[in-house]
Image (cartoon, rainbow, N blue to C red):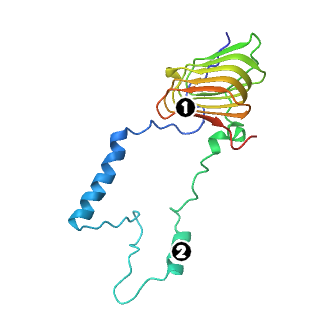
Amino acid sequence: MPDAHHEGDAGGPPRFPRRPPALGLALPGLLLALVLTGCSVEMVRPGSASSAPQAGGEESAGANQADQSADPDVTESEDPLQYARRSYYADKITATLDCANGEVVVDKSDQTVRITRDCAKVIIRAEYTDLLAEHVDSLLVEEAGEFSYVLLRSADTVVVAAEGTDVWWDEGNPTVDVAGFGSAANPNPVKE
């Protein structure tokens, strides 16, 4: 069984552990407490002037927009589908395999692997691993394969047991079983 290996940072997409559900509950509770006590909060970016109108006049919307466009801290939002695009990984490939014996096991972390031929079975058991593949009969992302991105041309069966893993396929309607917290498996909306 061939495997792919790369030490260190592969230059892939940033990986952040999912935040615990309890943190998501704290903010609404805090906001409710502020509202009930009659307090208000103004969100101001560090190093910028308050956007509240000054006494003696109101700030115009046009002036406020001009200030924001000139602010070097304001950046365009990240493309939410960039990790579903094959072109995103073009210069990040750390291993290329051809699946000569019909099965590939990826068990080295922090890499971007490309499989160039159809494959009967692919198993991912390494965290922070990205995979680009052609047709895969059976894909299994084990629990140890957490925080991975997987792009398939097509598949027959997709099983995701890892946390924080996203799987996309371009064609077909595979049988899907996703058990990992924060994981998803869906048709790719940006086929490349």
Decide if residue 103 is on the left or right side of residue 65: right
Tag count in the figure? 2
Q: Is residue 134 above or below residue 104?
A: below
**Among the 4 quarters of the image, the one containing residue 47:** bottom left
**Among the 4 quarters of the image, the one containing residue 58:** bottom left
Outermost bottom residue: 56
x, y (%) of residue 149? 60, 33
Image quadrant containing the C terminus: top right
Residue at point 45% right, 35% down?
17
Q: Which residue is mark 1?
A: 165
Residue at point 68% right, 27% down?
174
Q: Residues within 10 Å of mark 2 (few under 14, many from 20)?
A: few
Query: Do residues under tags 1 and 2 come within 8 Å of each other at their CB atoms?
Result: no
Q: Is residue 94 above or below residue 33?
A: above
Q: Secondary structure at mark 1?
A: loop
First in sequence: mark 1 vs mark 2: 2
Amino acid tagged 1? Thr
Q: Which residue is mark 2?
A: 65
Front residue of 53/36: it is 36
Q: Is residue 140 above or below residue 39?
A: above
x, y (%) of residue 69? 56, 70
**Label drawn at residue 81:** none
**Among the 4 quarters of the image, the one containing residue 155:** top right
Q: Is residue 118 above or below residue 172?
A: above
Mark pair 1, 2: CA separation: 38 Å
x, y (%) of residue 1? 67, 9
Residue at point 46% right, 31% down?
181
Decide if residue 169 is on the left or right side of residue 16: right
Amino acid tagged 2? Gln
